[in-house]
Image: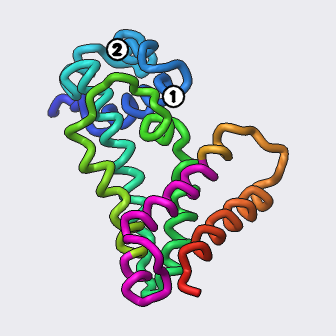
Amino acid sequence: MARPRIHDAELRTRLLEAAAETVAQQGVDSLSLRKLAAEQRTSTTAIYSLFGGRAELLVALFATSFASFGDSQRRVPVTGDPDVDLRELAVAYRDWALRNPHLYAVMFGGVLGSVDVSEEAQLASAAMDPLRSAVASAVAAGTMAGASVELISHSFWAIVHGLVSLELAMPSTSGDETRRAMFDAGTESVLRGWSRQ
């Protein structure tokens, strides 16, 4: 009988998720490979085998976070109606962030500090491609105007990001329906702001 693989994709995923939670809640300096290994019932050798070391684990964490987020954006169907597509991308953004708050903090919360993720910057940028594509379609169709595709995309992302970040940072007694209604109203305001009158 073949020996079971212990340094597999499932372990890699568990280590990344646990590392994300630790970094998001306690900061990057709190991440200890020995403690992480013990909590996940593996060895530091497994972590070195899978990632190469602590710095590489943190870079992998950043890359994995943006890959997961980007995948969720690319799964949003393109309907041919840019306004519908932009609304659905915003909803997918919020849904992903609420399901993955620790990964969201790794991506946007500044928790990685001085970790060099410059080589992964293209991955972060590519995660926004569906948004830029939907805005480009709206500009081409004449339903959005007044600035470049990049500027409109950035302003739309800023509003969505701000609304989601506030929702994650500030506990609310409001139900999800109320929070979703506020999110939709904010999204609608930026769509209307760039709409051709």
Magenta segment includes 60? no
Q: Is residue 87 above or below residue 100?
A: below
Q: Amino acid at mark 1?
A: Ala
- Residue extending farthest to the front is 146
Q: Does residue 1 appear to the left or right of 13 in the view shown?
A: left
Secondary structure of the residue carrying tag 2 is helix
Q: Is residue 150 above or below residue 107?
A: below
**Mark 2 — residue?**
33
Q: Is residue 6 visible?
A: no
Which residue: 55% across, 40% down?
A: 101
Give the magenta part as a residue range.
136-164
Q: Amino acid at mark 2?
A: Leu
Q: CA distance from mark 2 to mark 1?
A: 16 Å
User: Could you tell me residue 49's position as x and y percent?
Assistant: 18, 23
Magenta segment includes 142? yes
User: Could you tell me residue 56's position as x and y percent?
Assistant: 24, 26
Secondary structure of the residue carrying tag 1 is helix
